[in-house]
Image: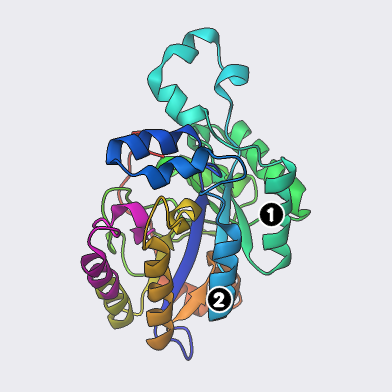
Amino acid sequence: MLGEYEFALCLTHDVDRTREGLRGLYYGARDRDISRFASVLPGRNTYWQFDTIMNLEASLGVRSAFYFLVEKDLFTDFPVREWLRPNNWVLYRGRYDVNSDAVADTVRQLDDGGWEVGVHGSYRSFADLKRFRYEKSVVEAIVGHEIVGGRQHYLNLSIPETWQHHAEVGLRYDTTLGSSTGYGFDHGYGLVRPFDGFVVFPLTLMDITLPNVSNDYDHAWRECERLLEEARENDAVMTVDWHQRCFSDIAFPRYGELYRRIIERALEMGAWVGPPGELYRTLSDDPELLDALTSPVGPAVSPDIPPRS
């Protein structure tokens, strides 16, 4: 498929929140896990796992893509009547400012180190061209160059309008097509090309869709290994989304361990491993290979809207 490689494994991370905050108190009380209370202690931030990921991936000789969110704020961007809606508190409060010193410095550190930086379109931006253009420009201003891809928040997607918006603002690929409740190659083993000059990397696996990794690690690993074997057997492009918060051993025990094992096994199996943007550039230089790996877009997909993150 890819020269010397058996299949491709694309690594991505959606950055939804950079701090657990009061959510740690809620989950700690719900699960009777006092270790979750550490998230609200001064100087502690269980969700800030960027160094953990960089060190892990660098030790394996791979890189990944990080998609950063530029979300609206409930109190400054919405009318007062919207403040009373419970879902809006979940969606718009407790997010981060990508232009804050800590986040912006991390974005630049990732970019300088060879990691891909992309945009994680905000909750409503999948249907709002003007808003999505703004969000892309914010991330680009931080890294100082154009970005080529990303993923919509909550996998919200309107086909083909969302992809047309992405292409219009200059993106070359999207990784939204997938599920937040299941995993697998539901959209084929290759890429989808809805129109010339733009490709879609279907999402094969999101961390939260697996059997509970902390409570049943062996089951989760068997499912991951099965997907890797299916990818190899079908010369597939497999894309995974591992939220950066899931590398917290306090909030998500053993999720980081499983991620490492996925990469190690893929490398053992002869896979190409890296960020989608790098694979896109490689395929763009080989039109015949790109043609062989892509298919037209399938049936329309409705937005995956229920708030969870």
Q: Which mark is residue 290?
A: none
Q: Quadrant of the N terminus?
A: bottom left
Given residues 48 and 95, the one toward you in this image is 48
Are there few (<14), some (14-19), or many (20+) residues within 10 Å of tag 2?
Answer: some
Q: Quadrant of the C terminus?
A: top left
- The answer to if 206 sits in the magenta stretch is yes
Pinpoint residue 272: horizontal percent, then vertical percent: 48, 80
Residue on which disc 1 sits: 106
Pinpoint residue 166: horizontal percent, then vertical percent: 56, 46
Q: Amino acid at mark 2?
A: Val
Tell me the element at label 2.
loop
Q: Amino acid at mark 1?
A: Thr
In the figure, is residue 288 to the left or right of 277?
Answer: left
Camera-side mark, 1 or 2: 1
Tell me the element at label 1.
helix
- Residue sitting at 74 percent across and 54 percent down? 143
Residue 128 position (above or below residue 203) = above
Are there few (<14), some (14-19), or many (20+) residues within 10 Å of tag 1?
Answer: some
Residue 180 position (above or below residue 26) = below
Pinpoint residue 161: horizontal percent, then vertical percent: 47, 40
- Residue sitting at 75 percent across and 44 percent down? 101
Given residues 38 and 209, the one toward you in this image is 38
**Range drawn in magenta:** 203-225
In the figure, is residue 259 to the left or right of 99?
Answer: left
Q: Which mark is residue 62?
A: 2
